[in-house]
Image: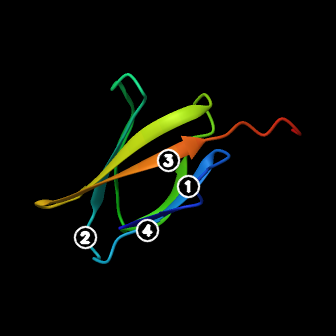
Amino acid sequence: FSVWPNPSQGFLQYMASTPESVDIMVRDGMGRCVFKRRFSPSCGTLDLSGLSQGSYSITFSIGNAVRRSQVWQKIDTNR
């Protein structure tokens, strides 16, 4: 699993090394689920632009394989 860019300004790219669907869950710093969705194919873009600035944990699940990543959501003050 790969996710980029980090830090993000609202949009993250993701890619898994399998053609299967991927379940993605994003949790905030308090552990609350703020985004959850199943995606197919296993690569694409996550729109997290509605989230506040801060650190988020992303869990990617495909079958029994699970990977967690930390990402930083940054607010673009020039918009």
Q: Quadrant of residue 78?
A: top right
Q: Are the residues at dot 3 and dot 1 in contact (C-beta closer than 8 Å)?
A: yes
Q: Pick whichever of labels 2 and 1 is earlier in the sequence.
A: 1
**Neighbour class for label 4 at 10 Å: few (<14), some, many (≥20)?**
many
Q: CA distance from mark 4 to mark 1?
A: 11 Å
Horizontal side of 17 relative to 74 (left or right) equals left
Circle 4 is placed at which residue position? 43
Going by the image, does 48 lie left or right of 20? right
Q: Quadrant of the C terminus?
A: top right
Residue contact at pointers 2 and 1, CB within 8 angstroms: no
Q: Secondary structure at mark 3?
A: strand
Quarter holding the N terminus is: bottom left
Indicate the amino acid at tag 4: Cys
Label 3, label 1: how many angstroms apart (C-alpha)? 9 Å
Looking at numbered disc 1 in the image, what kind of residue is underneath it?
Leu
Report the disc number at residue 71.
Answer: 3
Nearer the observer, disc 2 or disc 1? 1
N-term mark: 4 or 1 = 1
